[in-house]
Amino acid sequence: MKPSPRFWALATAVALLLLPVLFPHPFVLSIVTQAVIWALLAASWDLLSGYTGQISFGHAGFFALGAYVAAALSKHLGFSAWLGLPLGAAGAALVGLGTGFPALRLRGHYLALVTLALAELIRLTSQNWLAVTGGPFGIYDFGTFPGLPAAPIPRAQILYGLVAAVVAAGVGLMLYVCHRTRAGRAFRAIREDEVLAESLGINTTVYKLLAFGLSAGLAGLAGTLYAYYVQLVSPTVASAATTSLVIGMAVFGGLGTIWGPALGAILLYGINEGLRFIGVVYNLVAVGLVIMVFVIFLPRGLAGLRFGRARRTIRRDAALSAANRLDG
Amino acid sequence: MLDVDELRSGYGQLEILQGVSLRVGDGAIVGIIGPNGAGKSTLLKTVFGYLHPFGGSITVGGRTLIGLRPDQILRLGLGFVAQAGGLFADMTVHENLVLGGYSLPSRRELEPALEAAYAQFPLLRDRRRQPAGSLSGGEQRALALARALVLRPRLLLLDEPSAALAPRYIDEVYASIVSVNQAGIALLIVEQNVEMILSVAHRVFVLDLGHNAFDGTPAELRRSDRIRRLYLGETGATSWEAAES
Amino acid sequence: MSLRPPHPARSPSAGEREHESPSAAEREHKERALESLLEFLIQGIVLGGLYALFAVGLTLIFGVLNVINVAHGEFFAVGGYLLFGALVLLHLPPAASVMAAAAGTFLLGLAVYPLLIAPLNRRLGRRPAGSLYLVLTLGLSTFMQSSLLAIAGGDYLRVPPLVSGILEVGFTGVSYQRLLVLTVAAALLATLFAFLRWHRQGLAVRAVAQNPEAAQAMGINLARIFALTLALGVGLAGVGGALMAPLFNVYPAVGFPLTIKAFAITILGGMGNLVGALLASLIVGVAESMVVMVIPSQWQNGVAFVVMIVALLIRPQGLLGRATTR
């Protein structure tokens, strides 16, 4: 049995993840740790937009919310990172739930644009609410996880392990919900045909809200991890560039699969950082190109790659379905 | 003038026409009838270039239509009137007609062509500044027909011209169809209303499940026991719904 | 900047000196209040004019192609860069520079449909256009912005005003540069509306917006109309970018905040509705300008979003409803 490209992509990702263990170089550790954080963010976006079909163009906002809440709590109230993590995620989840309500009435581009506006409002707030968010300079000096070793390499490794564990838990949670619970089936039904789902007795309202809350919460969790790792939270975190990057990663990895975008994030971030050696600006050019090329020619992303003649199956797989569902 | 041979066509993976053939002679009225899902509309759309066929051939005067876009096929002398007219509802009657003359080779031909349209359908002249969507069903069909005639096509494709029309409007539409034909224009008409099409057509093709089931003159159709039993019912029902019930 | 409420009127008593000073002070307050009101109103209208150029182009593209052009702001930026190149580098006269910027943006826009949208169309077959195009144009936006950064660098490029001087309007004044923006915007938009209403190709554009299949049956070449419309839409943005270059400066991300605001405006006006976009642009422009009188100016940019969110909750179809270019 010839290993498919999907296998190679997975293998590459696993290899990248193991790099910090094999080569404990601070640069490698830094890249992989951040890559994993992006993986959680991308997967959380996919849960809402790819898997449930509710397009969000404002996930940077939820990410920023988690980061800012955690950082602010730690800086102004002295909360430890262990408290900041769940609280930041909860804050983002609440706002996500709040967004979910008006979103019930919106479809397609309207939803995307409203979420974009929300993220912009969050960015504006973070830029101007000096007392809490530190304005354009952001929040810094709020500490990180307690009890880490002092020596830099082991510190970074343990930190990486921590982050990776939380991310794995998050992604695992999403995969579990999607594949093993009734909620997952409801999400897929809503994505396929919301009217039909409703008429089949699925309470689309509850499940759409659930998707929003869960997705936003996990995006916020990624934000808290970012905050405690990078130890600086500034308004750029909520910028549209962040959302653009996340969507690029998801499209690259394969929409509607949860693990696809996580994988895409790790690979794309790795490539992105690697390309920095060429020149800082060209990596974003590549991201833009990747999004365009993949949307046109490879809508299923990496998750959908397969060698050999495509079999004409009547049953559509998740990624293509999600990609198509992004229409209208 | 139109030759369709072993045409296979459909949507995506779904093959609806599985080898259909028909001919339209110069100046003839040819009808296509058959139960729902038989592929009648699919056939018209494929001929006019909205759908790309999987196989077979479509030629007009020996020249193939396959691979051409609708706007290119239009310039070869074919016209298309979609189900329910395909009018631009928010534009005025006049604007719709002007659009009908969009591909006239010279701007100078537009005025006389519009005049001819108004002459043939006087009711449109009265309504020329009204939005097309505000016209009655029958008037809308007249407008759709007039619009398609601005370019003086040699062959006109009509998709269910009587659909959703009150009976008196149906008579008007078919009177127009006859007079259009008398001017020398060939017509290929897909119809649910079997009685009307049998009354005007020179030749009728029956489609069923993507295949040719019969072709002949209306008289031959009425005489064929098999067809009568299968498609028209003993009672000689006027439409497929009645026959199938 | 806050306006103090006018003092309650006091009954005048002629000849009493102690009443003369307060009423003079009153009048001065009122004059100043009126001055700033007028000033903000004018700024608001000028801003509205710019927004209109931007939003109408965006709406045109959506109405005809059913695509939301997330990269619209990047064409605005390109207009600015082309103006900089023509005016500052090539020393062309201002009028020629603006036209060069417009033409350049238009030509660039012509490439978008055949290179990006048509292939996606082909892949999706008969499926209606939708949010996947949104992702595509998002990619284009990222690509264009970072390409500008790579090619031209991130510095804020300064461009001298195209016209100098200030026009006195009552108690206040508005710069000729801003007036130029308003005038050109008004002229271009009027031309566009006239084109759509009366010109044969404008009729074709409206036909494609209303019913693409019927339009094809009229002999209209869809691809050509799509490409033309897109180029027209982004061309308007490019002109806006060229005209605003002296005011905004030129840098890669200059257009993006406008894009987001334009989304808010188009939703407010009713997606696909050109007149709605025009109206909404003026409303948002004036509102943004005047709201500075009551809230701190850093929050000014949030007005558009709040307006949009409120509008969507109350009346999702926008002020004038979802209509295609009629």
Image (spheres, rainbow, N blue to C red):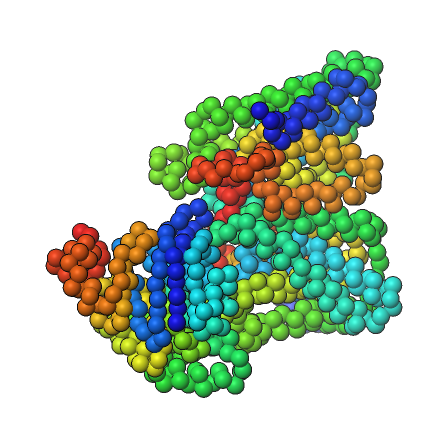
Residue drawn at x 35%, y 36% is: A200
Q: Is residue A171 left or right of residue B190?
A: right
Residue drawn at x 63%, y 38% is: A252
Question: In the image, residue C58 lies at what x, y percent?
Answer: 61, 59
Residue B224 seen in the figure: yes
- Residue lying furthest left: B235
Residue nearer the viewer, C255 or B51: B51
The quadrant where residue B41 appears: bottom left
Residue drawn at x 40%, y 49% is: B15
Question: In the image, residue B78 lies at what x, y percent?
Answer: 43, 71
Compared to residue C65, the image places residue A82 above or below, namely: above
The quadrant where residue B189 appears: bottom left
Question: In the image, residue A264 lies at what x, y percent?
Answer: 65, 33
Q: Is residue A154 left or right of residue C300?
A: right
The quadrant where residue B43 appears: bottom left
Question: In the image, residue C178 lies at what x, y percent?
Answer: 74, 66
Q: Is residue A137 left or right of residue B119?
A: right
| Total number of numbered discs in the rendering | 0
Compared to residue C150, the image places residue C191 above or below, namely: below
Q: Is residue A193 left or right of residue B241?
A: right
Quadrant holding the N terminus of chain C: bottom right
Residue nearer the viewer, C164 or B31: B31
Residue drawn at x 49%, y 48% is: A328
Residue nearer the viewer, A203 or B80: B80
Compared to residue C156, the image places residue B205 above or below, namely: below
Residue A50 seen in the figure: no
